[in-house]
Image (tube, rainbow, N blue to C red):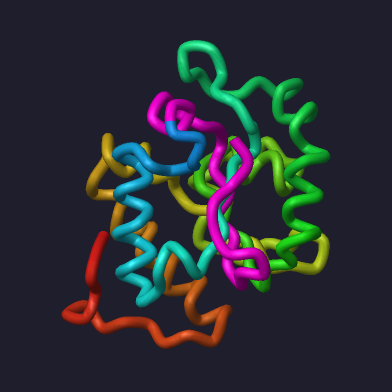
Amino acid sequence: MFADGAPGAELLFVGEAPGADEDASGVPFVGRAGQLLNKIIAAMGMKREEVYICNVLKCRPPDNRTPLPGEAAECWPYLREQIAIIRPRLICALGSPAARTLLGTEEPIGRLRGAVHDFHGTPLVATYHPAYLLRNPPEKAKVWEDMKMVLRLLGRPVPAPGDRKGG
């Protein structure tokens, strides 16, 4: 599975790997986590078609386990080339595996989120993966704070709480 979205998108979301639904459809983030990501994107006042969505791994790991470092390393040249082609203004890493791969760190996502990092001159915001939010709904508030930071960095308006369409 390669990606979904607009070439030249200003916002790039990077997840860890395809799940079963994504593996079957060939499109990233189409299962329950993808539906939640769509709601988050809508709450930001954007459309899925405006952003670019991809994963570190291009195929589903056995038993849907977390990608191994060697697997991420094998897929790294593809991801690096995708980022170079898209040239986003901002990257949003969804979950620890994506953030750790992009930032070259072992820091947990809880320490990485809430700040702006640098990916070779491109701002990067790390946040919790939508699948994590499905298991831990109270953490959605932290992700919304991260998405407000993303919007501010992109120079886009931050919707008022009553204006949000998703999340």
Q: Position of residue 60 (x, y in %)?
A: 54, 23
Q: Position of residue 8 (x, y in %)?
A: 67, 70
The image shows a total of numbered marks equal to 0
Image position of 61 with respect to 100: above or below: above
Residue drawn at (49%, 73%), measured in percent from left and top? 149
Residue drawn at (68%, 36%), measured in percent from left and top? 106
Point out the residue furthest to the front here.
25
In which quadrant of the rendered image does the N terminus lie?
top right
Image position of 122 with respect to 152: above or below: above
Image position of 51 with respect to 156: above or below: above
66 with respect to 123 (left or right): left
Q: Residue 157 sits in which quadrant?
A: bottom left
Asked if the magenta segment contains residue 128, the reply would be no
Residue drawn at (68%, 62%), measured in percent from left and top? 117
91 with respect to 44 (left or right): right
Q: What residue span does the magenta drawing correspond to?
A: 1-24
Point out the residue furthest to the left here.
162
Front residue (pair 67, 142): 67
- Residue 96 shows in the view: yes
Residue drawn at (59%, 60%), measured in percent from left and top? 12
Q: Position of residue 76 (x, y in %)?
A: 77, 37
Q: Residue 143 sits in which quadrant?
A: bottom left
Q: Position of residue 94 (x, y in %)?
A: 51, 48
152 with respect to 134 (left or right): right
- Residue 107 shows in the view: no
Asked if the magenta segment contains residue 6, the reply would be yes
In which quadrant of the rendered image does the C terminus lie?
bottom left
Front residue (pair 127, 112): 127
